[in-house]
Amino acid sequence: MAKPHIVIVDPAVKRAEIETFNRLVHHSALPLTYHLPALFGWDSLVTQEHAASIKGIMILGSGSSVWDKFDWQEALIHWLKPLMLRGVPTLGLCFGHQLIAHIFGGEIGPAFPDQHKAIGLRAVTLNTSRLWGTARQGSLVVSHREAIVRMPPSFRNVGSSPAVKAEAIEHDSLPIWGFQPHPEAGTTFLADQAISLTTQDLRFGHALVDDFLRIAAS
């Protein structure tokens, strides 16, 4: 039987987030597996993963939209939803955040009336959550055009900013969370997005992702 582990799903359509995965490996108490469904298909998940040994799932960002309804997206939903309902801790980041909301009946749409792409660093206020504990404020990397425009039932909004109402969401009872920003972002992500920041600017986000790794491993 497979060892307990955390699944990292990278829905990248152009470039894999290898740097992000490597950082997660160094901060996780459990082994991680890495899957690139949009670039390399689903064989690594459906043939190698054992549902009973999955202790956590993290879904990263993507250049695609939940409305694209690509075959790999439909397969991801089919694989992911039963695991979330079973209570497997799950964290969605940007695309992953929107996908979770979409699965549970929320609505995704343009984040801004002119449909521009928000990119850079954004100050976010986080309310009390089972993931990170007490309320706090900090800045997170953003790169997106779409956002949650109608919250899914059974979720509460636990993070907001003047720009985006649903910056962070949490299921009422299941261990499921999502962030519209990219708290996982590393220096390669910044370079790809032409965002000029320092590693100090990434620490607040990295701490949030590490909180999830600890919960999944507990």
Image (spheres, rainbow, N blue to C red):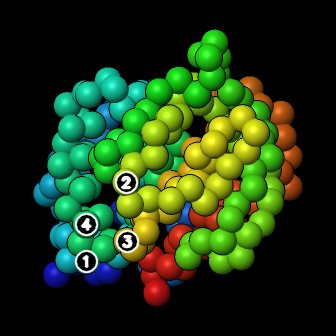
Disc 3 vs disc 2: which is toward the camera?
2
Q: Nearer the viewer, residue 16 or 166?
A: 166
- Where is mark 3, residue-wise? 174
Q: Residue at x 71, y 76 (%)?
A: 134
Does 82 sit above or below residue 100? below
Q: Is residue 186 visible?
A: no
Kindly indicate whether the residue at mark 4 contacts the one at mark 3 (C-beta within 8 angstroms): yes
Q: Position of residue 178 (x, y in %)?
A: 51, 54
**Marks 3/4: CA distance?**
7 Å
Q: Work out whether 16 lies above or below 58.
A: above
Residue at the image point whose x is 56% and y is 56% from the top: 157
Mark 3 or mark 4, earlier in chain:
4
Residue 85 shows which numbered tag?
4
Q: Kindly indicate whether the residue at mark 1 contacts the one at mark 4 (C-beta within 8 angstroms).
A: no
Given this view, does label 2 or label 1 mark the residue nearer the observer? Answer: 2
Residue that badge 1 annotates: 53
- Position of residue 187 in the picture relative to residue 211 (left or right): right
Residue of label 2: 153
Q: Where is residue 69, by image quadrant?
A: top left
Q: Residue at x 39, y 49 (%)?
A: 152
- Check disc 4: other Cα within 10 Å, few if <14, some if 14-19, many if 20+: few
**Which residue type carries mark 3?**
Leu
Could you tell me how far apart the alpha carbons at marks 4 and 2 are, in whole angstroms?
A: 14 Å
In this rendering, the label closer to the viewer, 4 or 2: 2
Which tag, 1 or 3, sits closer to the chain's start? Answer: 1
